[in-house]
Image: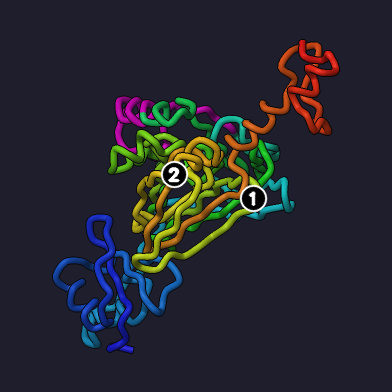
């Protein structure tokens, strides 16, 4: 396996490779360490080198000291997801454990759970001004300045449930298995273990911010615990190989690992631009790395609801009308 090619490591947000395992180990000894993200034939996702046995053993050598696993800084919460198309998640907390969530996401909680509304991100380090900065960053994404915490203040295990506001799937993300970082759509975050930091991710290219549909700011989740996000409709997960590109509707993007390059591409063509109904631009995602897509973005759902809603109090669009507006004009229902 040492000579097997197809290995990559991440440096400055870019994938370096492909290369053999021996070459990867040699590079990591110079430019990286066991915290460096790697991807190759023995991995399903981008993971830290310490979690890949062949890479870790190669780095430390047969006479090197054993690798001591890092202790998790985030609470190690348990969860269970219920339902099919209208899902909710139940979080089980041991005494003293905490989960943070978006305001309004709570569905229920047992008697021993203490709820508290906090200013800014409770996972941020520093004092009051640090919280002001994190709160301001959340405001830039269109989210609330506050976040809600749920702490088990009892002596036994307690439960708290969360649900999304529209149909779809709840996706559990183990950040410790993804290199400790994930970028997600700003409206998708539901809850996470205490210790996960919620920040903003500015896209590198001006075109992304100007034409990206979802804005030039997305959320960045960092830490080594569990975060749960929501995807509208049906969820799709895909692993892009190095150099593989996929073009998607900007609203359908839920999350991606930092190794995936995100850019904007013009749809092209006069008829496509005016009548295609897909907007002027696609999001282009270039691997390597994992991406998650949703089949029903909330913006698309809201657009369909608004389009079908009555335009005045006295009348609306008939679903079965073949003539549409012309039919209403002919039958006198055009007020």
In the foreground, 152 or 242: 242
Per the image, label 1 sits on a secondary structure element best described as strand
* Residue 122 magenta: yes
Residue placed at 42% from the left, 45% from the top? 268
Figure quadrant of residue 136: top left
Residue at x 45% of width, y 61% of height:
290
User: Residue 319: x and y, percent?
Assistant: 80, 32
Residue 49 counted in the magenta span: no
For the point 38% across and 53% down, which residue is it?
A: 181
Q: Which residue is mark 1?
A: 169
Q: Is residue 152 left or right of residue 135?
A: right
* Camera-side residue of 96 and 166: 166
Residue 295 drawn above or below residue 52? above
What is the span of residues highlighted in magenta in the rendered image? 115-136
**Gap in angstroms between the C-alphas marked 2 and 1:** 35 Å
From the viewer's perspective, is 135 left or right of 104? left
Depth check, front residue: 149 or 200: 200
- Residue hosting label 2: 269
């Amino acid at each position: 396996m040492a000579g097997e090619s197809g290995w990559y490591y991440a440096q400055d947000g870019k994938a370096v490779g492909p290369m053999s395992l021996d070459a990867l180990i040699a590079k990591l000894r110079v430019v990286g360490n066991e915290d460096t993200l790697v991807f190759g034939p023995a991995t399903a996702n981008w993971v830290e080198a310490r979690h890949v046995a062949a890479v870790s053993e190669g780095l430390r050598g047969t006479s090197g000291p054993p690798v001591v696993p890092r202790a998790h800084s985030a609470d190690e919460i348990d969860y269970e997801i219920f339902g099919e198309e209208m899902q909710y998640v139940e979080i089980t907390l041991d005494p003293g454990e905490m989960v943070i969530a978006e305001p309004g996401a709570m569905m229920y909680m047992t008697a021993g759970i203490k709820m508290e509304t906090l200013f800014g991100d409770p996972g941020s380090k520093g004092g009051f001004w640090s919280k002001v900065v994190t709160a301001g960053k959340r405001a830039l994404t269109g989210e609330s300045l506050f976040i809600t915490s749920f702490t088990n203040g009892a002596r036994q295990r307690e439960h708290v449930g969360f649900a999304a506001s529209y149909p779809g799937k709840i996706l559990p993300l183990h950040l410790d298995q993804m290199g400790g970082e994930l970028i997600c759509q700003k409206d998708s975050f539901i809850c996470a273990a205490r210790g996960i930091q919620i920040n903003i991710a500015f896209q590198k290219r001006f075109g992304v911010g100007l034409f990206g549909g979802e804005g030039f700011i997305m959320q960045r989740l960092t830490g080594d615990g569990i975060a749960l996000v929501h995807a509208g409709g049906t969820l799709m997960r895909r692993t892009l190989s190095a150099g593989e590109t996929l073009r998607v509707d900007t609203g359908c993007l839920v999350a991606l690992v930092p190794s995936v390059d995100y850019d904007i591409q013009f749809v092209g063509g006069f008829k496509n631009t005016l009548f295609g109904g897909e907007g002027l631009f696609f999001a282009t995602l270039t691997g390597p790395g994992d991406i998650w897509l949703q089949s029903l973005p909330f913006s698309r759902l809201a657009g369909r609801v608004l389009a079908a809603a009555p335009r005045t109090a006295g009348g609306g669009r008939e679903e079965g009308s073949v003539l549409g507006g012309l039919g209403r004009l002919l039958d006198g229902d055009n007020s």
